[in-house]
Image (spheres, rainbow, N blue to C red):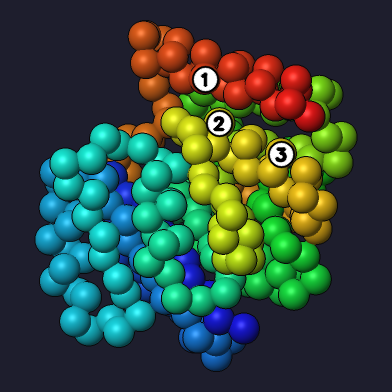
């Protein structure tokens, strides 16, 4: 089996090379064919230049720069999927909050399922803020409540509707494109997978504090935060009535 790893990036220069190497090492140890696709939302911190500088020495590495396009996580992933070559797609956060070590667990399950999701809310999962030296980010309470609502109103066997760390069959996207703003795109994806009776499994993992910089989804309580919450609620309501 072969794998395409998609990394949507925005100002990840301080850790992007370490992340690429960490992901690459997982596949090398397993002797698997893979590629890593960086899809950058026009970073201004040097991320693009850094990736270009190492690209010639990494024959598995692709770079897509989304110039003159509105920053959008779902569309970045769609661009990566279109560019991908292999039958299994993995995407994850590019800030080490999704530790690459769990790619091994995704790979070991994908031969039995159409989609394997790393969940933050399973009994064996562990959150970064369970360690008292880390402070919980503002959006964590909102995320927890929203996922509880999704589980109550949608599907009882899914716990993390906004995971963003997944291994999934590329064939699924022959007739489907991701749509949304941030985490709401993942809710729509799960609803589609369920509607089409694809086989899904969640696995536990331990998320980490962001390596450096600022999260693309953690915001202050302002208009942008209110808009994000609004999108989440509208997505949930739409799926409930469409279900």
Residue 51, position in %: x, y? 21, 65
Q: Are marks 2 and 1 in contact (CB under 8 Å)?
A: yes
Q: Circle 3 — which element? A: helix
133 or 82, nearer to the observer:
82
- The residue that label 3 is drawn on is 191
Which circle marks residue 184 in the picture? 2
Residue found at x 37% / y 55%: 79
Q: Tell me where residue 148 sits by quadrant.
A: top right
Residue found at x 35% / y 80%: 60
Q: Tell me where residue 188 sits by quadrant.
A: top right
User: Badge 3, how many Cα within 10 Å: few under 14, some, many 20+?
Assistant: some
- The residue that label 1 is drawn on is 231
Q: Is there any visible trace of residue 11 in the rendered image?
A: no
The quadrant in which the C terminus is found is top right
Residue 220, position in %: x, y? 38, 15
Q: Is there any visible trace of residue 53 in the rendered image?
A: yes
User: Badge 1, how many Cα within 10 Å: few under 14, some, many 20+?
Assistant: some
Which circle marks residue 137 in the picture? none
Left or right position of 136 against 54: right
User: Which comes sooner in the sequence, label 3 or label 1?
Assistant: 3
User: Which comes sooner in the sequence, label 2 or label 3?
Assistant: 2
Left or right position of 242 against 95: right
Instruction: Calculate the distance from the C-alpha at mark 2 to the C-alpha at mark 1.
Output: 7 Å
Q: Circle 1 — which element? A: helix
Residue found at x 52% / y 20%: 231
Classify 58 as above or below 173.
Answer: below
């Amino acid at each position: 089996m072969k794998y395409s790893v998609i990394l949507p990036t925005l100002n990840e220069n301080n850790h992007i090379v370490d992340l690429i190497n960490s992901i690459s090492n997982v596949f090398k140890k397993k002797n698997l064919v893979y590629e890593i696709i960086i899809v950058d939302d026009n970073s201004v911190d040097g991320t693009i230049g850094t990736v270009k500088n190492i690209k010639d020495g990494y024959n598995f590495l692709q770079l897509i720069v989304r110039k003159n396009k509105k920053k959008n996580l779902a569309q970045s992933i769609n661009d990566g999927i279109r560019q991908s070559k292999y039958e299994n797609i993995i995407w994850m956060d590019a800030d080490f909050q999704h530790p690459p070590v769990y790619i091994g667990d995704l790979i070991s399950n994908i031969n039995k399922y159409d989609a394997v999701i790393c969940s933050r809310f399973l009994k064996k999962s562990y959150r970064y803020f369970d360690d008292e030296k880390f402070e919980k980010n503002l959006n964590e309470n909102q995320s927890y409540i929203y996922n509880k609502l999704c589980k109550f109103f949608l599907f009882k066997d899914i716990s993390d509707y906004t995971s963003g760390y997944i291994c999934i069959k590329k064939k699924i996207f022959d007739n489907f494109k991701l749509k949304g703003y941030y985490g709401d795109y993942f809710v729509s994806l799960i609803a589609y997978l369920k509607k089409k009776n694809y086989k899904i499994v969640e696995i536990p993992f331990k998320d980490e504090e962001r390596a450096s910089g600022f999260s693309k989804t953690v915001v202050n309580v302002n208009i942008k935060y209110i808009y994000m919450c609004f999108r989440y609620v509208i997505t949930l309501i739409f799926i409930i009535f469409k279900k």
